[in-house]
Image (cartoon, rainbow, N blue to C red):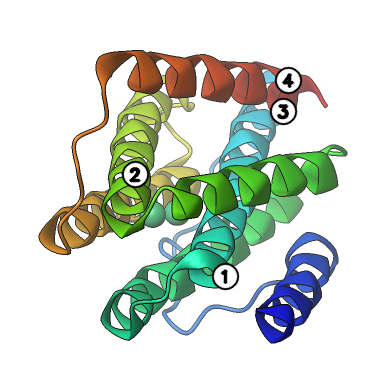
Amino acid sequence: MLDHLIIGFDKALRTVFAPARSIRPVPGDDLPEAALTDEERSDAAALMRVNHCGEICAQALYQGQAVMSRDPVIRRELEQASNEETEHLAWTEQRIAELGGRKSLLNPVWYGGAFALGMLAGKLGDRWNLGFLAETERQVEAHLSGHLARLPADDAKSREIVGQMKIDEARHAETAIGLGAHELPAPAKQLMKLMSRVMTVTAYRL
Ligand SMILES: [Fe+2]
Ligand SMILES: [Fe+2]
């Protein structure tokens, strides 16, 4: 347990402060940069900051989960999803830089909150933990659909990234369900929506 916590802390520092790496090529990396207005560019950068912040939280959730889960099969299965979240982190980070934006100043706070939530869900046992992950992934997928509608129409590079993330998140939800996730009660889902709303609205500005 202590070993896991130390590894977890090391990962936390790296997640928040070190650049993430991607094994897959960054989606849309070969596309040309569109001629965006200043307004469109800063809007796109802010939306990608929100998504980056969401990926920081995803890292924390999966890490909190890994600290708590005792089932080696579940841990191994979720590692693949967790690795893809690291790629999402790298993609959104690169895109923010290309758009001349910056990452959320509150990332350490979001990370800490999500890690605590992941551990809390883990304490309730694997099936609830998986239910929490599945619901998170579903909500992120819906959120990304919203961003595809909101991002500047010409910003194909950001759209490619968000589109691939959306596909990955849907698969992550399927993975968690396949591992035996419980369906969360409606009030829990509502509470999660409310919390992510606070995060997305805040991260758009900060
Ligand atoms: Fe993700
Ligand atoms: Fe995901």
Task: State whether residue 49 is above or below residue 115.
Answer: above
The residue where tag 2 is placed is: 137
**Is residue 100 visible in this depiction of the protein?**
no
Quadrant of ligand 1 in image? bottom left
Ligand 2 has an atom within 8 Å of the beta carbon of the residue at disc 2:
yes
Mark 4 or mark 1: which comes first in sequence?
1
Mark 2 or mark 3: which comes first in sequence?
2
Inter-mark Cα distance, 4 to 3 = 4 Å
Mark 4 or mark 2: which comes first in sequence?
2
Ligand 1 has an atom within 8 Å of the beta carbon of the residue at disc 3:
no
| Quadrant the C terminus occupies | top right
Task: State whether residue 164 is above or below residue 27.
Answer: above
Inter-mark Cα distance, 2 to 3 = 19 Å
Mark 3 or mark 1: which comes first in sequence?
1
The residue where tag 4 is placed is: 202
| Quadrant the N terminus occupies | bottom right
- Please identify, in this view, whether the residue under mark 4 or under mark 1 is nearer the observer: 1
Q: Mark 4 touching mark 3, by CB under 8 A?
A: yes
Q: Which residue appears at 72% of the width and 49% of the height?
A: 111
Side (left or right) of 43 relative to 100: left
Ligand 1 has an atom within 8 Å of the beta carbon of the residue at disc 4:
no
Inter-mark Cα distance, 4 to 1 = 28 Å
Identify residue type, mark 2. Glu
The residue where tag 3 is placed is: 203
Mark 2 or mark 1: which comes first in sequence?
1
Inter-mark Cα distance, 4 to 2 = 20 Å
Total marks placed:
4
